[in-house]
Image (cartoon, helix red, strand yellow):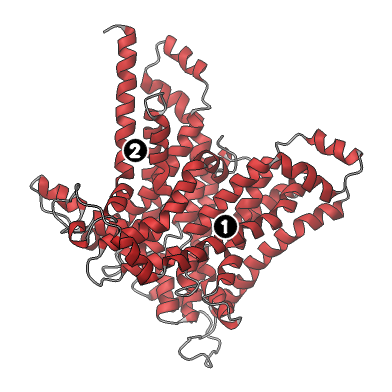
Amino acid sequence: MTLNQQRKFKTFLTGLFAWSVALVLFFPIFWMFITSFKTELQAISVPPALFFEPTLENYVEVQERSDYVKHALNSVITSFGSTILALIIAIPAAYSMAFFPGKRTKDILLWMLSTKMLPAVGVLMPIYLLSRDYGLLDTRAALVIIFTLMNLPIIVWMLFSYFKDLPKEILEAARMDGATPWDEIVKVVLPLSLGAISSTALLSIVLCWNEAFWSLNLTPSDAAPLTAMIASYSSPEGLFWAKLSAASTLACAPIVIFGWFCQKQLVQGLTFGAVK
Amino acid sequence: MKRSITRLLMAPSVILLLAWMIIPLSMTIYFSTIEFSLYNPDQNGFVGWENFEFFITDPAFMPAVANTLILLLSVLFITVVFGVMLSALIDKPFYGQGIVRVLLISPFFIMPTVNALIWKNMMMNPVYGIFAWISTSFGLEPIDWLSNHPLMSIIMMVSWQWLPFAILVFVTALQSQDTEQKEAAQMDGATGLHIFRYLTIPHLARPIAVVVMIETIFLLAVFAEILVSTNGGPGYDSTNLTYLIYNQALLQFDVGTASAGGLLAVVLANIVAFFLIRAVGKNLTV
């Protein structure tokens, strides 16, 4: 083999290997998707059926059985609502820490991150009882508040690490022209960091959409987002994998497709800009 | 700009997070010292350490702590070791790289409840599952994963979710690795293994630190996978601390004991965080 051939062979092997790993890891999702178009009998056939006449029946039944649209709406409202709220609170803080760092800025940032180390279960009882006493059990408001606070440290961190890299000269120039802090944020910082803010928002939406501790414990029925709706399919009322798959596909598809488009930003975001 | 304005801008975030931390936590501390059951809410006298004693002497306590740590360490080990190896192997140009990336990251976006249901039913079911079919195709006895290896099943589900994250972070990091340095090493006769050991691994130190830190935050709190797939059983074989406290709180309505357990979970998280930050902290800079 010549050197060139050797190199080609190596590339081929790498590709083969990478594709196999990716397909193995993706297989459960593929299988869920395929199963959602089977009849219940085909879904549990041994050996597994690969060729069959697809049906959309399961999707219709999921909507009838558990009101998918209602729960999807809950997911959308809680994840988008809390993300917007958290951004409004976090942007000024990140701005002030990135552009006017004080002696304690680093400590404050680390402290914020440390609040994430507090396990949710440590405050389960108080939050449960407070929500009960204020009539917030099984409401979307409860989830919006909790998701906002839950993601606030991460959002502040991410925005901080982006803002920090903006050229300070531009801000100084704006200030020379008499811009107030409000002007600075709205007219200079925000337009310059639209990309950063949207990837922060994306990450927050993904985390809220898939959050399962608080949604399972606080919003069991009416305000239940998709994570909690799906859990109701775990009860052993017999084998109905096709319907389960259809419900799961519906619950995950929006956020998986969403994630495909922004996976690069997500890596940067989730690692606080430490990995670029 | 005046300090007062910068403080004002920071205030909402700081005050909200402070409140989010202090109010519920002090309530948990208070509840943990009184007798407080939702079945009998009027009776709530001071009981001192009794709730803690009750929680710690519960036969489920030691297994739950052990399971929490085993789950954390196994998933960290699997995702970091396989993540580094796989990302080093696929970090070269090949056909369809973009699609492979998209396929690889997908499990990370699957919600925990769906994750558990797919694995519990379609993969691990001892009669109709894919694993059972593979086993019987090779003439082997199918394994009843969830009944016989419950904790390992949970570890598999959670690793499936986090391995893609690790791979993606490492691949992203490897793309910024200095190729000239690698080529120079190759010229000097370094083998692939040497390059991996002395160039790639040190380059990945910081991403590994970040992955370990983020995963730890989420792994100590694994809950939905257990609730949906095994309910902590059989016995306490797959009960972790989070699940045990949930059980105490919302299934047995014992607020006092659940709060004591919650505080112990906080202490455990802090111990882990302490060792973790010491171990990986030097690779993390603000």
Expressed as whole percent of the image width and height from the top left, the position of residue A4 reads: 34, 9
Residue A217 image position (x, y, % from top left) = 47, 72
In the figure, B145 relative to A62: above or below? above
- Residue furthest out toward the top: A2
Q: Residues within 10 Å of mark 1 (few under 14, many from 20)?
A: some
Name the chain letter of the residue that bears numbered label 1.
A
Give the residue number, with chain letter if any, for mark 1.
A116
Residue type, mark 2 in image: Ala
Q: Is residue A183 left or right of residue B125?
A: right
**In front here: A265 or A52?**
A52
> Image height check: is B61 above or below A51?
below
Question: Residue at point 34% right, 38% down?
Answer: A22
Q: Which mark is residue B45?
A: none
Crowding around mark 2 (Cα neighbors within 10 Å: few <14, some 14 to 19, many 20+) is: some
Q: Quadrant of the N terminus of chain A?
A: top left
In the rendered structure, the answer to whether residue B187 lies left or right of residue A183 reads: left
**What chain is tagged by disc 2?**
A
* Viewer-nearest residue: B42 or A236: A236
